[in-house]
Image (spheres, rainbow, N blue to C red):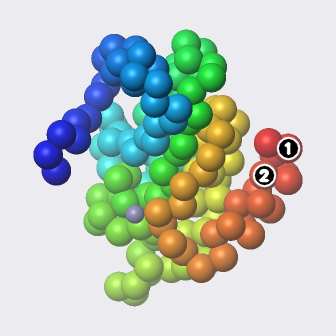
Amino acid sequence: MPNVYQYSLDRLNEELDEVTSLGIPSVIFFGIPKKKKDAVGSGAYDEHGIVQEAIRQTKANYPDLIVIADTCMCEYTDHGHCGVIHDGDVDNDESLTLLAQTAVSQAEAGADIIAPSNMMDGFVAASARGARRSRV
Ligand SMILES: [Zn+2]
C-alpha cells in the first residue's frame, strides 16, 4: 500500500516525533512478529510481543498519544487466518480465548483502545471477561 511502512522498535520514536509534531492525536499498531509464525499465532498474545513492546515504548515516551492496538492473529499465524484452524475452518470459540488473551495483554501494556479487526463472534464479551479476570 502506498505510503504505508513497517517500523522496527528502534525507529519508532523517530516516527512518533513526527506524528506528535504534526498534532496527530493517535496511532494504531499492527504487528509483524520477529520470531517465526505458528499455527496458534502465539506472537499476538506474547507479553513481550512486538505490539505490546511498541505500546509500552510509546506510552513511556509519548504519554499523551492515544494508542490503538489491532487485535487479530492473522499477522502471527503461519496460515494467515485470523484464528485457530480445525478441520479446515476457523474455530471461533478456541480463537476467542486467544484473541481475548491478546486484547488483555495489549491493555496491560497500556493500549487505550482495542481495535478488533478479527471480527470473531463473541470477541467483545470474551475480552470483557478476560479484562475482569486481569483487572485491566
Ligand atoms: Zn486478521
- The label shown at residue 131 is 2
State the residue lying farthest toward the left.
2
Evaluate whether residue 38 shows in this view: no
Q: Residues within 10 Å of mark 1 (few under 14, many from 20)?
A: few
| Residue 120 sits above or below residue 14 on the image | below
Q: Measured from the top left, where is residue 86 in percent x and y?
A: 44, 80
| Residue 81 sits above or below residue 27 on the image | below
- The label shown at residue 11 is none
Q: Residues within 10 Å of mark 2 (few under 14, many from 20)?
A: some
Q: Measured from the top left, where is residue 127 in percent x and y?
A: 70, 60
Closer to the camera in the image, 64 or 43? 64
The quarter of the rendered structure image containing the C terminus is top right
Label 1: which residue?
135
Closer to the camera in the image, 132 or 112? 112
Residue at 60% x, 51% y is 114
State the residue lying farthest toward the front.
23
Q: Using the rendered view, name the quadrant where residue 80 is placed.
A: bottom left
Residue at 55% x, 13% y is 61
| Residue 96 sits above or below residue 8 on the image | below
Ligand 1 image position (quadrant): bottom left
Q: Measured from the top left, where is residue 20 in percent x and y?
A: 45, 20
Residue at 54% x, 61% y is 116
Q: Using the rendered view, name the quadrant where residue 12 is placed.
A: top left
Instruction: Give the Cα distance between marks 1 and 2.
Output: 6 Å
| Residue 74 sits above or below residue 2 on the image | below
